[in-house]
Image (cartoon, rainbow, N blue to C red):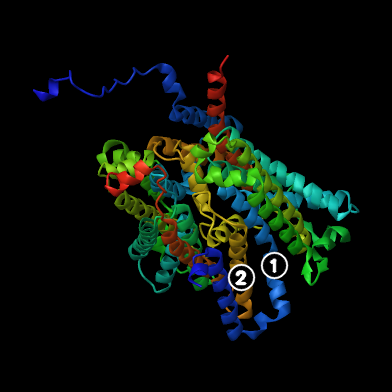
Amino acid sequence: MSILLRYREFVLALIIVLMVFGIGLYAPAFVTQDSLIGVLNDTSFLFMMALAQMLVILTRGIDLSVAANLALTGMIVGMLNEVFPDLSPALYILAALMCGAILGFANGILISWLKIPAIVVTLGTLAIYRGSIVLIAGGKQVNASEMSSTFAGFPKIEFFGLNSVFWIAVLIACMIGLILTKSRLGRGLYAVGGNPVAARYCGIDQARAELFVYTVAGAVAGLSGYLWVARYGVAYSEIALGYELTVIAACVIGGVSIGGGVGTVTGTLLGALFIGIIVNSLPVMQVSPFWQMAISGAVILAAVVINARAETRPDKLILPEARRAAARGRI
Amino acid sequence: MIANEKTDQRYQVLDRPPRRISELFLRWESILVLLLIAVVVFNTFISPYFLDLYNLADATYNFSEKALIALPMALLILVREIDLSVGAIIAVAALAIGLMGDLGYGPAVLFVTGMLVGLACGMVNGFLVTSTGVPSIVITIGTMSLFRGIAQVTVGDQALTTYPQGYLDLGQTYAIAMPPIPLSFLLFIVIAIAFGFFLHGTSTGRRLFAIGSNPVAAEFSGIRVNRLRFALFTLSGLFAGLGASLLVARIGVMRPNIGLGWELDIITMVILGGVSIAGGIGSIPGVVLSVFVLGLATFGLSLLNVPGIVINVLIGGLLIVTIAAPIIVRRVINRPA
């Protein structure tokens, strides 16, 4: 038990189970199967966006432009649907992935090639992408009535009661999990974030790693854009406004270190689930939705303050001389 | 005379090479001055209403409050920290002002209330950052939700609109009649000069540069790094509170979404002002210049009826291009033949 408690993911899962249990005592309606499935369906966007953001944060970066990318790609795909109403959903998905990946690639080029800090680049592209929505759509919005049934129907297709957005999130989680644990590129991301200088001496291409993570973050944001617009039935300039901070919060609660090099797929998913449960349980508990922001703020602070103690571990001394010197108190 | 003995020195400190004219032109502030001239000339040609004293005075309303908060933000970014919660602190401070207004307090009390609440929020940030050692971007994302959440919980979808006329006058009339200068702009100019003197003329200012260049080395050279960090977060909160006092007086209403997204506008001002996000580089004149570039560009574009969100596109592009251009130029110049 005490060994298990050392795993951040286990503690977080325990807290989530206790939280669901507590909410269930107060509002039994929340722990019904339908309601819990609803939580998973609603949190699907957060699952995939948080996973993609985790990749970026692993390399010591940050991508503030994902929500703007989501909204812009959603609008582009929505307008594509107006022109070509009868394409198969696979083509809309492909278009959304491409469009999002291009926007993410632009971030990646500026960050990896020109070495401009990620927060500066994505702050700029955040404004550019958001504003471009108004430029390309001329200030109008795409409504559910203008969407074709194949376009709007796809996110509502259900397997085992869970909608296709959730299953796409599962697919993305598996792919990112495999990349991070099994591929050289994925292990390289931890190395680049953990110690960029050492990674460079090991022959890991930092620029390539950064280009990869921002492109993936963009592609996932773009895909979410199509699914979001189709699911909620509207595309306009302010969808998912400020969502980038919720995504980053999910990562932080899930134990991804903003200093780079630390983070797991399981932790991030649990962090997103945590936020999803809070957001979805407030209406059931008849708490005003205005509480949502204050609660998630308090939770983020509690999570990082508790994590802070765990993260302060000293560097390992490898050479025997260094260890002897440290024992004599010279280092 | 020990001071004159140079023979057995172990290290030799080289004199600074003489300044060249070309360096002056490559300075960030020079680029900003050129940009500012371009903006003024462009706007003057494009609109006859631009160079009007009263129009310009009213234009300052739109950026002075943000510009005030940009000053402590510049110091924070200089020491490798960041405060994303300033917009939310505005909401909490405005909440306190609104509640005190409902209770019927006078202008001075309302104004000071905003500043004190901001100060308290800043101290919370400073305490959390210095006591946990967690990166300030994470802490202030948390306090951003918390502070704005407090405002949302208290006010909900209502608005607080009861303020004495004397308070509203602070934000809606000119502090000086001729030339017309609003209070917020007057405060910005005076405080910017004070900040410039503090950062570039005092030893504490030099310490901030040292912390930004290398926090560990700064700590080991006897600088109380955490105490200064705490002070800067407190300062940032205080100025966000001051911004709230001015903003509520100007618009006469407090809603929970007041100041939403301001943190990004303010950080854009600071970064365009040449403060390096990696710390240790930056100047107050640069930040002031970038405030004027952004403020006058926005004003000129809105005279042309360009929608606000399109102005954001141009400002985002301006941010990236002004930072990328010198890097590309340097790459091209330094390319091995």
Image quarter for residue B305? Answer: top right
Instruction: Using a 10 Å C-alpha cutoff, classify the residue at mark 1 as few (fewer than 14 neighbours), some (14 to 19) or many (20 or more).
Output: some
Residue depicted at 89% across the width and 52% down the height: A87
Residue A51 x, y percent position in the rendering: 64, 55
Task: Find residue B307 and report its horizontal and vertical position in percent.
Answer: 64, 46
SS under mark 2: helix
Q: Residue at x 50, y 28 (%)?
A: B37
Label 2, on which residue? A279
Amino acid residing under circle 2 = Val
Residue B59 picture location, percent across and down: 50, 44
Distance from the alpha carbon under mark 1 to that under mark 2: 9 Å
Question: Which numbered circle lies on residue A42?
Answer: 1
Q: Is residue B309 visible?
A: yes
Chain letter of the residue carrying label 1: A
Work out whether mark 1 precedes mark 2 in sequence or the reverse, and give the earlier one: 1
Q: Tags 1 and 2 in contact by the CB under 8 Å rule?
A: yes
